[in-house]
Image: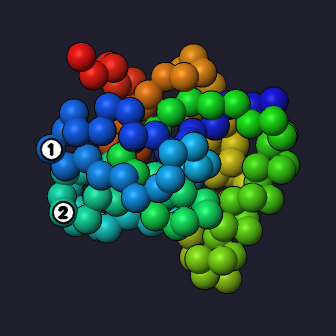
Amino acid sequence: MIQIFVATTETQGQRENDFYFVPEGEIVTLPVMTCTNEHVDGPCGCKRSMSGINTQKATTTMKISTFDGNLFELDRMIAEAMRKAGWLAREGQLGESYESRAYKISCEAAKFPVGTIVEYRDGQFNKREASR
């Protein structure tokens, strides 16, 4: 069993530019690419969000969860998501493969206890405090 990120609406609205278009609990992955001149709080949102592997939509809030499979199974899920979205055909042009994405996701998620709400900002994961 490994730790992963899933979409959550918890703590949405703590930042003015929060958004969520991913159903609660859907596994999310790192962005395939980000805009070159985009600021982390810019209008695109690519530098502050992760994408749902089924919906291909984005969210700015994630929760640490457990995955009942192993890293190989997560690799396969991400590869299928990238294939459906049309990215896998261009994998050679990307900075990393889906395998390294799965590994990075599991390593980053393992830094937090299960249930922790996090945000992704310009390549860094940070814990969010529960709304009061």
- Mark 1: give few (<14), some (14-19) or many (20+) Cα within 10 Å: few
Q: Residue at x 76, y 49 (%)?
A: 74
**Sequence-wise, which precedes: disc 2 or disc 1?**
1
Residue linked to disc 2: 43
User: In the rendered image of this protein, does residue 42 appear above or below residue 48?
Assistant: below
Q: Secondary structure at mark 1?
A: loop
Is label 2 or label 1 in front?
1
Residue 64, by quadrant, is: top right
Let me know if residue 107 appears in the view: no
Let me know if residue 14 appears in the view: yes
Residue linked to disc 1: 16
- Foreground residue, 91 or 70? 70
Q: Secondary structure at mark 2?
A: loop
Q: Residue at x 81, y 30 (%)?
A: 1
Measure the C-alpha gap from mark 2 to mark 1: 12 Å
Q: How many marks?
A: 2
Q: In screen coordinates, is 72 left or right of 48? A: right
Residue 38, by quadrant, is: bottom left
Q: In screen coordinates, is 126 left or right of 55? A: left
Colouring: rainbow
Q: Position of residue 110 (x, y in %)?
A: 63, 25
User: In the rendered image of this protein, does residue 129 appear above or below residue 123?
Assistant: above
Q: In screen coordinates, is 68 left or right of 47? A: right
